[in-house]
Image (spheres, rainbow, N blue to C red):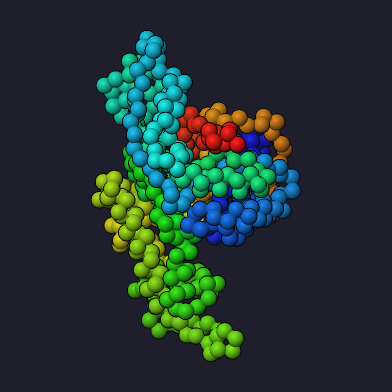
Amino acid sequence: MNQEQPIIVGLDIGTTKIAAIAGRKNEYGKLEILGFGRANSNGVKHGQVLNIDETIKAIRMALDNCYGSNPNLEISEVYVGIAGHHIKSLQTRGDIVRQSTDDEITRKEIDQLVADQYKTYIPAGDQIIDVIPQEFTVDNFQNIPNPIGYGGVKVGANFHIITGDKNAIRNINRAVEKSGLLTKDLVLQPLASAAAVMGQEDLEAGVAIVDIGGGTTDLAVFYEGILKHTAVIPFGGENITNDIKTGLGVLKTQAEQMKVQFGSALSNEAKANAYITIPGLRGMPAKEISVKNLANIIQARMSEIMDFVTYHLKQVGLDNKMLNGGIVMTGGGAQLRHLIQLTEYVTGLNARIGYPTEHLASGHIEELAKPTYSTCIGLILKGYSDYEHNRKQFETDFKKVEVPENLRKMEPRHEEPEPEQAMLQQQEKVRNRKGIKDFWGKFKDGLIDIFKEEEDHAL
């Protein structure tokens, strides 16, 4: 176990669940999970915290469960995901004329360029969550991924700026603070999910990450190694459950159970003569529900969500076979049967399910490999990117915490690897470190703490 690394905690405040996962990188650059807790979420609708008290209760329960899985943990700071229909994005351009043109371009100058973008005009009531450089220019040279070390008079970049509603951001912040925690950073959920399920080759091939959550479906589109577009679609798994409830006249809990157990995203794949028997309420006769009807309802809503995805891809001109990596679906909703076929049919692109296993150390419990936890694991990766790029202060006195047995998959112990295998492991180690670092390194340089607002000082 590598004790020289910080323990970083991701907190995913979702519409259906709140998850807290604590992780630390091992010597191979993979995440070892040191604590894991979840709780049902009641105070969140469509990704937005509406009831702060209910959300605090759920965060505390998720934390208690996390401590329950590993009593040696001490959690004070968390990386938090943000989604919701209030999230918007815009493209801007920024340039600076350099003072000392004889010297090479430094990290400080790039940080200044990014910091300047925080002064971009945005509508009143909104706040900038993130500024992500896309590609840089130095004088007449275009499309430079990283200009540090170049020489030139003028350096500029195109930026993807993500904004959100001030009140929505404040509600998340309050709920986290009142739970006894400090928000280390707010991270857009589709970016966190993308970090967890995407490898370096996906980034280069071009992919659309579609994270189907409970209240929202989050989208992040990458092309030629650049983040091209982000969007939050205001429909998710909860909408499907509510459609089933209304359409078939059942209780919400029954609707959710039917969706998970018998649901399919393609009605053609559902058996025409199969029925589900639902017990009647208070002595009423039992209900027979057609599996075909259930699939029709799910397919209608899922097709609508995928139409939104196609619409957003068209907006950035990437709807026609240009994304060689296709669509990567993750989040709890990605577990629906026949979703890959429906997605390929609606969008015309290849599709696969993205699991967060790419960056997890082997030997973790199977529960953590579900697409449901992609955002949470991506948040930990974001924290590591900050740590490795010295973007935020971390405690340097790292506590000795081992992976508890209950989070370890029980497997027979392996012998020492052969010399050849050890060499391969070493190469894998270097590759993994590079892969994860490159992902966030591309996007997050020189962040400004978004919580230091003027009005907060006035209080």
Look at the image and tell me in which quarter the N terminus lies: top right
Residue 451 appears left or right of 150: right
Comparing 223 with 301, the one in front is 301
Q: How far across and down, in percent of the image, does residue 416 sit?
A: 64, 41
Comparing 28 with 7, the one in front is 7
Residue 415 appears in the rendering: no
- Residue plotted at (32% across, 25% down): 137
The quadrant holding residue 225 is: top left
The quadrant holding residue 368 is: bottom right
Q: How far across and down, in percent of the image, does residue 317 sit?
A: 26, 46
- Residue plotted at (44% across, 42% down): 126
- Residue plotted at (36% across, 56% down): 351
Q: How far across and down, in percent of the image, does residue 355 sit?
A: 49, 52
Residue 303 against residue 75 in the figure, above or below: below
Residue 208 against residue 298 in the figure, above or below: above
Residue 304 appears left or right of 286: left
Look at the image and tell me in which quarter the C terminus lies: top right
Residue 384 against residue 403 in the figure, above or below: above
Q: How far across and down, in percent of the image, does residue 392 sit?
A: 57, 31
